[in-house]
Image (spheres, rainbow, N blue to C red):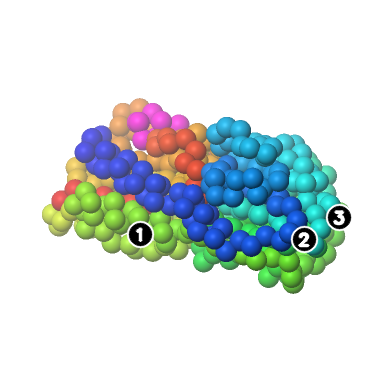
Amino acid sequence: MNALLRKDAETILWKSIAAVQPDAAVKRALQDLHPGSGRVFLVSVGKAAWQMARAALDCLGDQVDSGVVISKYGHIKGALPRCECFEAGHPIPDQNSFTATARAIDLVNDAGENDTVLFLLSGGGSALFEQPLIPDVELQGITGQLLGCGADIVEMNTIRKRLSGVKGGRFAEACAPAKIFQVILSDILGDPLDMIASGPACPDTTTCADALGVAKRYGLKLSEQAHACLQQETPKRLDNVETHITGSVRELCAAAADACSSLGYEPVILTDRLDCEAREAGRFLGAIANTHAAQGTKRAFLAGGETVVHLTGHGLGGRNQELALAATPLLAGISNVAVFSVGSDGTDGPTDAAGGYVDGQTQAKLDSKGMSIREVLAENDAYHALQAVEGLIVTGPTGTNVNDLSVVLLQG
């Protein structure tokens, strides 16, 4: 392993993550909060829920009467005043998701027209915030089908909205007549408000026809009850919501470019809308590294976005790990290049890794262990392959969630 490139990768990662923490952004948004004469309830949902809630409580103090905070397992970092904190399943909702969501609904159920619901939302909310309109087991099964069929996040959420009592604007209806002040940390390309965490407090721009089209396109197995839900329209207008959006993958890429410059790399942002199969993205970034490796320029090529994985095997991994591994053959034997890819939230798929790092020596190390990259990718087992060659990047929960960052480093 190229120790200098690995060290630079870690530095770029942490500087980028530090720049997109939600604390300052939440506090800026709250300058526009003018609650009514009644109570203030806090509901914070998503992978960055605890961090966002803490920032809001630091800013508002005793103005918040009570709250519910729902995040992924391992993401709650301690008790928060006047708030109940829950950890729940992601990417597939579990019983804790349902229990925590029920508690949030109970919290706002008797809210009146003078009350305010401060709703803090970040990515991951589609699994963490859920009140199923179909049996729990079937909802979990449909979520699994969507995760494995190659559907993108917009297609997934188009289905999930209609199977839920809180998604697609329905939580806002539950809060009425109280006003909702919503602060969103975006984790979807282009920041479509109704798609981030499936838009619990946003009018839904998708239609029943869209949902039925997704179900047909991917051959989803649905019960009659689930099929009927897809034909029930979601709210198209909400009059009780004020929304502020903050954070995005664009900010992540800009921060990464600044971090690269500070280390002497000439940064090139290829795109902040990477949206394709993880393996294809990996091969593309590997090809870029291969093309420019001999030019002698210290350069970094950056891409932000969110790729997808089409499950063909039964291994362990995530989209960033697959991307890194797919780049590996194109780096083989080149001493001055590396590729790394990470999820800004610190998790990648159902693993404890944020992503993966590979360089010109990774292929030889895998070969020496009898591991075929083609076979590993076919089994979707990038985690164990990268683990075997010290290629996993493990950060733990970062407190933010603004898509993924993939970087090609050329040492010059």
Q: Distance between the residues labelled 1 and 3?
A: 47 Å
Q: Is residue 6 left or right of residue 146?
A: left
From the top left corner, tell me how far across and down residue 53 is, in percent: 59, 46
Q: Quadrant of residue 203?
A: bottom right
Range shown magenta: 384-391
Residue on which the image places disc 2: 114
Mark toward the start of the polypeptide (1 vs 2): 2
The numbered mark at residue 223 is none
From the top left corner, tell me how far across and down residue 1 is, in percent: 25, 34
Dot 3 surroundings within 10 Å: few (below 14), some, or many (20 or more)?
Answer: few
Q: In which quarter of the image is residue 328?
A: top left
What SS does tag 2 mark? Answer: loop
Residue located 63% across and 59% down the image: 182
Residue located 34% across and 47% down the image: 15
From the top left corner, tell me how far across and down residue 225 is, in percent: 86, 54
Residue on which the image places disc 3: 224
Residue 372 seen anywhere in this rendered image of the structure: no
Q: Distance between the residues labelled 1 and 2?
A: 41 Å
Residue 383 vertical position relative to residue 129 in the rendered view, above or below: above
In the image, 9 versus 38, the foreground residue is 38
Q: What residue type is labelled 1?
A: Ala
Residue located 56% across and 58% down the image: 30
Residue located 65% across and 54% down the image: 119
In the image, 302 versus 294, the foreground residue is 302
Residue on which the image places disc 1: 254
Q: In this view, does 131 lie to the left or right of 181?
A: right
From the top left corner, tell me how far across and down residue 387 is, in percent: 41, 31
Does the magenta portion include 388? yes
Q: What residue type is labelled 3?
A: Glu
Single out the mark in the foreground, 1 or 2: 2
What SS does tag 3 mark? Answer: helix
